[in-house]
Amino acid sequence: MRAHPLAGIIAAAARLISGVQVRWVDSEPDPQQAVYFANHSSHLDFVVLWSSLPAEVRAVTRPVAAQDYWNAGLRRALAVKVFRAVLVARHVEKNEGHEGSANPRLAIEHMLEAMGDTDSLILFPEGTRGTGEEVAAFKSGLYYLCKHRPGLRLVPAYLNNLNRILPKGEVLPVPFISKLTFGSAIGLEPGENKLAFLARAREAVCRLRDLS
Amino acid sequence: MTNLDPQLVWAFSGVLCLLAVSSLIGLALKAAIKKPEAQATIRNLNARIGAWWVMSAIFGLTLVIGQIGSLVLFGIMSLLALREYVTLLPTRRADHRTLFWSFFIFTPLQYFLIAIHWYGMFAILIPVYAFLFIPTRLAIAGDTESFLQRASTIQWGLMICIYCLSYAPALLMLKIPCYAPDAKLLLYLVLVDQLSDVLQYVWGKLLGKHKIAPVVSPNKTWEGFIGGVLTATLIGTALWWMTPFRPWVAGLVSLTITLMGFAGGLTMSAIKRDRGVKDYGTMIKGHGGILDRMDSMCFAAPIFFHIVRYFYVP
């Protein structure tokens, strides 16, 4: 897949603004298909993660982003053309007392289709941005992706300080130096149930937080 | 590009010769010494020398461009230094907009005031206006948790990273009789200050035994301090011809620069030790961050500026 001509420039700008220091712990960048999953505390999260991947990995990696935020004007143009984002409707789980606003199965199908046989995804399984202090419980998307794609590599990552650069509710960024730590890939074990798997995936992200 | 002052060219050529000699020594040490415990030090030394080439090239280029070049260079260094500083210190969500003001309003304004040679406002923008603005903006944000600590952390960062550092390019706005108004004084300050750092490191590695402040800065020794201050002062004295000073005055001024530089290094180390880190950043290979390199300059520049302004500007 050829990259958009602006992709390299935007990635360099994002790295400059976020001052991101990237570390691969017991792992290394690999253009093989994978799902990169990380903690979520800022709108900049996927831009920074995507920008920190080496160009050949970045070219085949598509962020999953919320349709309601990225679906208009310049944001949409950036998201769709440059990042090749997979826009999905945010799913509000019924057991939180709200009406489900989107069909989670459709979102999963959409992601699988976007991945094809070669492309990787960037996913934030917390579903929504947190304050940056705690990693919330993971939603089940990661599990269903693995169910449909046995053997899928899941690469955990922890993003540090992005919530300080652009916290929830702010429009203008403040430059802090951020850190991005990648860990070694995990996968769904045979017979592993949903809750155990999601807890283990979250644990993989939290472990990287303690390292960074 | 303006006609370059021949003295500026001479001084800068001296820097390049010194770098060439250092690189040769670095290569010789790498080839000669095989002890594994010494090799890490030599690798770091060579990384430092490599970074010095890059820093000298950037600085030399800005000197050639003239005042705007120096202002842009130091302005960017101020922003990067402030970024390293606030990253290291605890801030809260409510500090966000105050920090935005610090980075994107006060910093450009401070350097703009130098560009238009408005000394009266340059000297008070941060100690008066920003000083009062910051706690007010934080109070409006409404979070009172550790209020005074948060306000003073931001005020201190602005003072060190923006105000103090901006005194270095501010030298270009001084009008000294019978002395060409160019970047020679800035080069002189940078040379003496940075050579003092380097020579303290070199003497410390060669002879260092007695630690000055083991808790604050484990690498600083009396031997390094005395050797570095003396040799940098001697070099500063020998460079009197590029300054408006007589030789003995150049000696005293150089001594002041080196002592202030030492004070800066020590103070900025105390913050690092309190926060439990070795370096402020990783931007400059072998050296750490911008603040690790400019800590001495933050303390030396304002004092040097005011000495020159008091005694040499009518």
Image (spheres, grey):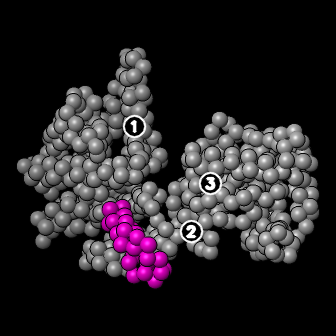
Residue at x 41% of width, y 16% of height = B34
Nearest the eye: A196 or B213: A196
Q: Amino acid at mark 2?
A: Pro
Nearest the eye: B102 or A169: A169
**Residue ID for mark 3:** A159
Q: Foreground mark, 1 or 3?
A: 3
Within 10 angstroms of label 2, few (less than 14), some, or many (20 or more) residues? some
The subunit carrying tag 3 is A
Give the dominant element type of the magenta stretch: helix, strand or loop.
helix
**Quadrant of the rendered structure where residue B181 is?**
bottom left
* Magenta-highlighted residues: B134-162
Q: Foreground mark, 2 or 1?
A: 2
Q: Is residue A209 above or below residue A17?
A: above
**Quadrant of the rendered structure where residue B30 is?**
top left
Q: Is residue B49 in sight in this rendering?
A: yes
Please, what secondary structure does the residue beneath circle 1 have?
Answer: helix
The subunit carrying tag 2 is A
Q: Is residue A71 left or right of residue B312?
A: right
**Residue ID for mark 1:** B48
Q: Is residue B18 above or below residue B141?
A: above
| Whole-percent x, y for residue B25 in the image | 34, 26
User: Cβ–Cβ below 8 Å for labels 2 and 3?
Assistant: no
| Whole-percent x, y for residue B296 in the image | 28, 51
